[in-house]
Image (cartoon, grey):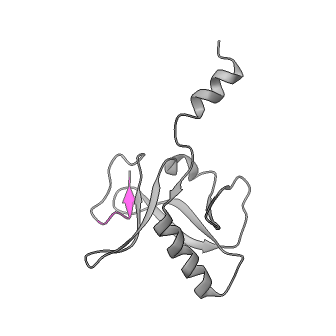
């Protein structure tokens, strides 16, 4: 039999939320400032599609949906809907600004397989 305290301590050992790096948070903040709005948050979702079965979606959103998981990273709110949250637990969003790559990247420990472009996973 498991006591509630044991359940809580076990659940706390695995990452349960998405992580936004400082570099990515600064980029998101700059993009929101360019939009000239203060009501936008970065929404990260998983949708069916892509060459591997599921694809990531990152977009600015002002909506609040029932069951949203919201995390704050230096003033930048990242929102994940309740259906996408299990697929994104422990995933890290970074921003690359190099000569060979520019854009947001997602390192997802839940992805069993991913495509070469990094936009979809299984």
Q: Is residue 102 above or below residue 35?
A: above
Q: Quadrant of residue 31?
A: bottom right
* Residue depicted at x 30% and y 66%: 117
Disc tally is: 0
Q: Quadrant of residue 41?
A: bottom right
Drawn side of residue 113 relative to residue 78, left or right? left
Q: Residue at x 61, y 86 (%)?
A: 35
Residue stretch in magenta: 117-121
Percent across and percent down for residue 26 are: 52, 73
Residue at 49% over, 47% down:
90
Q: Is residue 3 above or below residue 106?
A: above
Quadrant position of residue 12: top right
Q: Is residue 67 magenta?
A: no
- Is 57 rendered above or below residue 83? below
The N terminus - image quarter: top right
For the view shown, which residue lies furthest in the top direction? 1
Q: In front: 11, or 62? A: 11
Report x, y in % for residue 74. 61, 65
Most common secondary structure along the magenta stretch = loop
Q: Is residue 29 above or below residue 80?
A: below
Q: Position of residue 30 (x, y in %)?
A: 55, 80
Name the residue: 60% across, 80% down.
Answer: 32
Horizontal relation, residue 79 to residue 63: left or right: left
Q: In the shown orientation, is residue 117 left or right of residue 69?
A: left
């Amino acid at each position: 039999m498991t006591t509630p305290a044991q359940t809580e301590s076990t659940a706390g050992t695995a990452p349960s939320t998405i992580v936004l790096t400082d570099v990515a948070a600064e980029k998101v903040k700059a993009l929101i400032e360019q939009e000239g709005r203060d009501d936008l948050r970065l929404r990260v979702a998983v949708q069916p599609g892509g060459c591997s079965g599921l694809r990531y979606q990152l977009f600015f959103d002002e909506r609040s949906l029932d069951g949203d998981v919201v995390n704050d990273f230096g003033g930048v709110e990242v929102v994940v809907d309740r259906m996408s949250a299990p697929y994104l637990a422990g995933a890290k969003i970074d921003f690359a600004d190099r000569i060979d790559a520019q854009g947001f990247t997602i390192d997802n420990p839940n992805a069993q397989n991913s495509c070469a472009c990094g936009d979809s996973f299984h």
